Amino acid sequence: MLCPYCGFGESNVLESREAEDGKVTRRRRECLKCKKRFTTYERVGSIDLKVIKKSGKTEDYSREKLGKCIDKACWRMSEDEKTKLIDEIEMKLLNWPSVEIPSKEIGVLILEKLKNLDPMAYIRFATVYLDLNEIDDFEKLIINFKNKK
């Protein structure tokens, strides 16, 4: 770990603790050269999941992309609530039987979570996800939502 002050490559760990509900390790360090202290955060670097798009094309899973989808539908939620929602969806994806997940299934997971969490966010997401273009389709969505709740 390079010191952010002098660039030296060795430091002592003074303290370690869990952060973000155990998903991150926070470490307080001291540079062996300049003796200044700094904090580092350690988390899982990459998730080797692949998303199979509607077109059949496969791309790497992106937490940022999932976050953007959630942001658009859940603009009334706090950042902590959004992060928790993304974490829950991501955990389901990590426990998926395969490392290749159809984008349709990710959409279904989001809809399931939003249905109980925020009905308006559910409607906003479903409108885009289900590609609703007609008023009748929108009306059917709301009726189905009320019946299944």
Image (cartoon, rainbow, N blue to C red):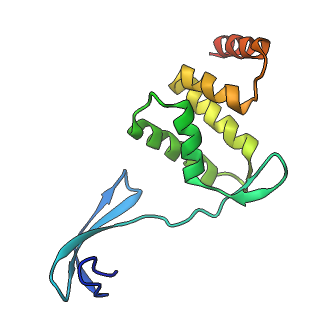
Q: Can you tell which quarter of the image residue 10 is in?
A: bottom left
Q: Position of residue 64 (x, y in %)?
A: 55, 51
Q: Position of residue 116 (x, y in %)?
A: 55, 24
Look at 73% across and 45% down and name the residue there: 103
Give percent across and percent down for residue 144. 71, 14
Q: Considering only vertical position in the picture, is 147 above or below 10?
A: above
In this rendering, is residue 121 above or below 32? above
> Which quarter of the image is occupied by the C terminus?
top right
Residue extending furthest toward the right:
56
| Residue at x 76%, y 29% (from the top left corner) | 131
* Residue at horizontal 67 percent and vertical 27 percent from the top: 126
Query: Is residue 99 in sight in this rendering?
Result: no
66 sits to left or right of 15: right
Residue situated in front as seen by the camera: 139 or 133: 133
Residue 80 vs 18, above or below: the answer is: above
**In which quadrant of the rendered view does residue 50 lie?**
bottom right
Quarter of the figure with the N terminus:
bottom left
Classify residue 9 as left or right of residue 51: left
